[in-house]
Structures are given as structure tokens and as C-alpha cells.
Image (cartoon, rainbow, N blue to C red):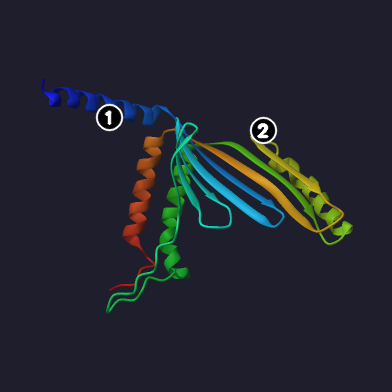
Amino acid sequence: MDHAAFLIPLLVLATTLFFIAAIRVPARVQLHGSLLSARFQAAASFSWGPAAARVAWNGGPPLLSLCLGRHTLYSRPLKPRPVRAAAAGRQPPGLPGPLQLRGLLPFGGRFLKVLREETTLERVFISARVGLSGPAGTGRLFGAYAAIRPLFCCDPRVSLQVQPDFSRPVLEGSSEVSIRVDCPLAFGIRMARIILAARAAAPWESPA
């Protein structure tokens, strides 16, 4: 039996199904953050169907996890790469200055345009407990919050809950943002173009 005659149609079918899913099945990006007892935790996840990639930060190196359903297939901490010594006759790349940052502004506009056209905000949830050094200051702060809260909560997708604490200075809470990527294939292609164009411009790199 010719295995190639069987594998080639199977490969074509699998590729076709993948592209159809990448067009029709939405993906989701979720951002989580919490601050409790002066300890900050954060996580970001990208899920598409049963597959998901998650990065969690708990004070140490970020932890990358690749999951399928409820099962974790791969997990490892992300450690920064060591800085290589500059080659002879070359200056190490530095941070962009104010004038150089102007070259990145068009890419920022394109990035925001892709987000507006290819994604949909599903949910924003913020819950916090806030207290200042004195009850009077806490009261004034909570009064200002009560005045502006209707501006943010007129959208049913947004939930903003702030509780005052008049007994002590405190700032604790949690937040969650969920964004749907309507067409992952189109989103990925457009974002890749922006990233490649920005890297080609590279206004912060020093010339050889």
C-alpha cells in the first residue's frame, strides 16, 4: 500500500480543517490581577477551543503553561536571557529616546486599529477595598468614586466594585479582563505584519 497516497489527502484535510477553525472558532484572551496583603499576582491566558497557553506571575519568574482541556501538557518558568557582550565595533542596543519613539507611533495606531476591528470586549471586572490614612480622606475619595462610577458602569460588560475602609490605609483587590478574538487567523496575520514592520524599522537599535 502506498502510504503517501493515504497521508497526502489526510494532511490536506487536516490543514483545511485547521484554517476553517482558525476563521470560524473565536479565541479568548483573559487577564487577571490581584493585590492582597501587599502581594501582587498576575496571569494572562490565550485559549482557542480546548487548547490554552497561560503565563502566571507570583513574584518569581513567570510560569508558562500549555494546556489541553484540564490537562497541563507543558510547564516551565520563563527566565531572562543573559545579555551578550557587544561585538567589536558595535554599540549594544539601548532604549529608544523621545525622538526615536516617534517612529513607533504609526505601529501603535495600527495595533489599536487591529484590536478595535478584530476583537470584542466581553467582560471587565474590578473589585477593590481602599482606605487612606484618615477617615476624612477615605470619605472624600469614595465620594469622588460614587460620582464617576455611573460613567464606567453604564456598559453591562463592566463591573466596578469599590469598598471603603475607614479603619486603616489599605489597597487590595482583584481584576479580570476578557477579550474575544473573533477571527484568530486574520488577527494573527495582521499582528504579525505589524511586528515584522516594527522590527524592520527598529528605531532603538544602534547602527554597526
Return the mark for residue 82: none
The residue labelled by disc 2 is 156
Provide the secondary structure element on which disc 2 rests: loop
Q: Residue at x 40, y 63 (%)?
A: 81
Q: Would residue 173 be found to the left or right of residue 123 on screen? A: right
The residue labelled by disc 1 is 15
For the residue pair 105 and 8, the one nearer the viewer reads as 8
Q: Would residue 44 be found to the left or right of residue 195 on screen? A: right
Quadrant for the C terminus in the image? bottom left
Of the residues shown, which amino acid type is indicated by label 2? Answer: Pro
Q: Residue at x 42, y 60 (%)?
A: 104
Q: Residues within 10 Å of mark 1 (few under 14, many from 20)?
A: few
Q: Position of residue 44 (x, y in %)?
A: 53, 45
Q: Nearer the viewer, mark 2 or mark 1?
A: 1
Q: Residue at x 34, y 27 (%)?
A: 20
Residue that protrudes farthest toward the right in the picture: 136
Residue that protrudes farthest toward the top in the picture: 1
